[in-house]
Image: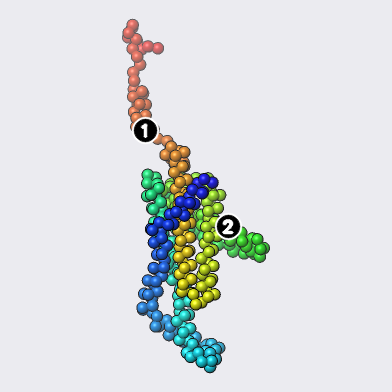
Amino acid sequence: MGLLLDSFWRAAAYCLRPRVMALSVLPLLLMVGLALGLGYFYWDGAVQGMRALLDASPLLASFWNWLQGWGLGDVTSVVAPLMVVLAVAPALVVVSLLVVAVLMTPALVALVADRRFPVLERKKGGSFIASVAWSVSSTVLALIALVVSVPLWLVPPLVLILPPLIWGWLTYRVMVFDALADHASKEERQEIFRRHRSSLLGIGILTGYLGAAPSIVWASGVVFAAAFFILVPLAIWIYTLVFAFSSLWFIHYCLAALERLRAEGGGRTPGDAFTPVAADAGALASTAVLPAPISPANGAPAP
C-alpha cells in the first residue's frame, strides 16, 4: 500500500511539470496542424461533395425547401461545412491521440528515470516489436472478454463493474510492459507481474474510471452544438492529461518495484546465474596448486 500511495502522489505532482503539460497539449497542436493542412488542400472539394450528397436525397431536399420556406435561406451552405467538420474531427482526434500515446510513454519513462532512478540499469528486456505484439494480443483478449460479457451488462450492477475491470486489465498489461521495457529484463518483468498483480490491476481500474471523464465532456459537446468547438478540444486535453497521469503512476510504481527487487537480489536478476568473481577464482586456483608441506625430519610429505 505504501508503494501504491507513494507512486500516486508522485504521478500527480509530475503532471504539473512543464514538460508533461506540454505533452498534454501536443494532441491539440497536432489536430490543429492536420486540420489546417487538410483544409488548405481539400476544404472546398469536401464541402461541395457534402452539399451534393445532401441535395441528392429527395427527402432531405424537401426538408431544405421547407426550411427555406420559413425564410432560413440556403441551409445547405451552413450544414455542409458543419457535416464535414463532424465527419473529419473524430479521425483527427484518433490520429493525434495515437501519435501522442506512442511518443508520450517513452518520454515519461525517460523523465522519471532521469530524475528519480538515474543509476537504475537499463537491461532492455522489451523491444518495440515485443511491445507491439504484447499490446495487440492483450487488446484482442480484452475485446473478446468484452464481447463475451455483453449479455451480463443487462444486470444493472455488472455494467458498472465488468467493463472497467476488463479495460483496467488491459491498461495494466500494456502500461506495465511499456514502463519496464527499457529497464527490466524479461525475468524481472515477469516477477513484478507476479508480485504486484493485484496492485497494478487496481491502478488500471482506477485510471479506467478516470478515463471516463473526457467522455462526459465529449458528450456535452455533441449535445450543446454551440459549444462543440470548445468542449471537444477540452475533452481531448483532459483525456491526454489522464493518460499522462496513468502512465506516470505505472512508471513510478514499476520502477520503484524494480529497484526493490534488485536490492533484494543483491543486484542479480531472478534469471542470472551466480558467477564467482575474479579474486575468488584466483584464490581457488592458487589453493589447488599449493604443494604438500615437507617434513624436515625425513624429507617425506607430512601426513
- Tell me if residue 150 comes above or below residue 275 in the rendering: below
Mark number, residue 165: 2
Q: In this view, does 189 lie to the left or right of 205?
A: left
Q: Where is residue 110 in the image (x, y as percent from the top left)?
A: 38, 53
The kind of residue on which mark 1 rests is: Val
Q: Is mark 2 on a helix, strand or loop?
A: helix
- Pointer 2 and pointer 1: residues touching (CB < 8 Å)? no
Left or right: 114 in relation to 198: left
Choose the circle earlier in sequence order: 2 or 1: 2
At mark 1, the secondary structure is: loop
User: Residue at 55% of width from left, 53% of height from top?
Assistant: 202
Residue appearing at x 32%, y 8% in the figure: 296
Task: Say which of marks 2 and 1 sits in front.
Answer: 2
Name the spot of residue 148 as percent of width and height, x first: 61, 62
How many neighbours does mark 1 have within 10 angstroms: few (below 14), some (14-19), or many (20 or more)? few
- 300 relative to 150 in the view: left or right: left
Residue 87 image offset from top left, x and y in percent: 47, 76
Could you tell me which residue is drawn at 44 percent across and 57 percent down? 15
Front residue of this view, candidates 2 and 121: 2
Name the residue: 51% across, 73% down: 221
Count numbered badges in the picture: 2
- x and y, in percent, of residue 125 in the image: 42, 49
Question: On the image, numbered disc 1 is attached to which residue?
Answer: 277
Is any part of residue 172 visible from this angle? yes
Question: What's under tag 2, amino acid-wise?
Answer: Leu
